[in-house]
Image: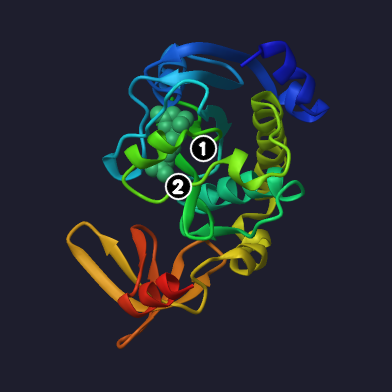
Amino acid sequence: MEKRQLTEFLAPAPLKAISEIHVFSQIDSTNAQAARLVENGLQGAQLIVADCQSAGRGRRGRSWFSPSASGLYLSLVYPFSITTDALQGLSLVTALSIRSAIQNLANDNLQLKWPNDLLVGNKKLSGVLLELCNDDKRTWVIFGIGVNYKLSEEQKLAIDRPVIDIQGILTETPSIEWLAGNIVNCLLENIDIFTNSGFATFRTIWNRYDRYYGKDIVVQNGTSARPGRSLGVDESGSLLLLTSEGVQKISGGEIFPSLREKSEVSKQ
Ligand code: BTN
């Protein structure tokens, strides 16, 4: 990743909002680096990108496979003065921002999987890991973004779920700097909207692209597995699940297609 080229793709507002950009050829995790910056008392929003990560972190304690030149590994650390509760929904907004950044170049159907995965035909294209750090004045949100960029067939097989990459969905593969710059531009624009109006503004668009809207799913959280029909998300970003006991609001967990939905998919 070339810092100068990345800077050229950033719009004026993000260039103003981000006080420093850190580019590493290798690091343990860009999210871990962002947390270290907070510990050392950073002042404004900062961006951290790396060509590869030796200890990339995924959601729910998983690791994120991060070989060199195969993915975009990026963290934006950004200060918020709203309450932690009000921040729910930001991770969904992050996935929507990745979608917006590439939608004009993609022929394929880019869909969202609650809370923050981007899928193309049931294969994962990107993931988001949001982490929070507090100092005495503010909450810093670390927006950790991983996008599969150019994975070899071997690398795809090394990942424990079906994956797809940017090279496989776009007619012309953009540079990694373009990808990073456009994602950051969309994310910062959406952070502004979110700060002013919350998640409610994003609800309709989220539900429009939700892969599992109206579908039978199972929501797994720890040892609990709740079956039901997805009714999409509410105005705070919680998942609405229609169960035999009525509609439940889910704020954490992971979606799996129901067995019936799974067999429909495998027939396609
Ligand atoms: C997921 O499990 O879907 C979330 C994956 C998030 C990976 C990104 S890569 C950049 C940033 N640094 C990390 O260590 N993780 C996130």
Looking at the picture, how far across and down is residue 203, in whole percent?
62, 65
Residue occupying the point 71% across, 41% down = 186
Sort mark 1 into few (<14), some (14-19) or many (20+) by Cα contacts within 10 Å: many
Badge 2 marks a residue whose secondary structure is loop
Q: Is residue 164 left or right of residue 172?
A: left
Pick whichever of labels 1 and 2 is earlier in the sequence. Answer: 1
* Res. 7 image quadrant: top right
Q: CA distance from mark 1 to mark 2?
A: 8 Å
Looking at the picture, how far across and down is residue 75, in whole percent?
52, 28
Q: Above or below — where is 124 with respect to 245?
A: above
Q: Quadrant of the N terminus?
A: top right
Looking at the picture, how far across and down is residue 8, in whole percent?
79, 19
Badge 1 marks a residue whose secondary structure is strand
Ligand 1 within 8 angstroms of badge 1 C-beta: no
Amino acid identity at mark 2: Val
Q: Is residue 211 left or right of residue 98?
A: left
Sort mark 2 into few (<14), some (14-19) or many (20+) by Cα contacts within 10 Å: some
Which residue is the extreme one toward the right? 12
Looking at the picture, how far across and down is residue 120, in whole percent?
55, 55
Q: Which residue, given by chain and number where applicable, does mark 1 sit on?
A: 148
Q: Is residue 130 visible?
A: no
Amino acid identity at mark 1: Asn
Q: Are marks 1 and 2 in contact (CB under 8 Å)?
A: yes
* Res. 109 image quadrant: bottom right
Residue occupying the point 33% across, 58% down = 253
Residue occupying the point 33% across, 23% down = 55
**Which colour style is shown?**
rainbow
Q: Above or below — where is 252 with respect to 77?
A: below
Q: Which residue, given by chain and number where applicable, does mark 2 sit on?
A: 163
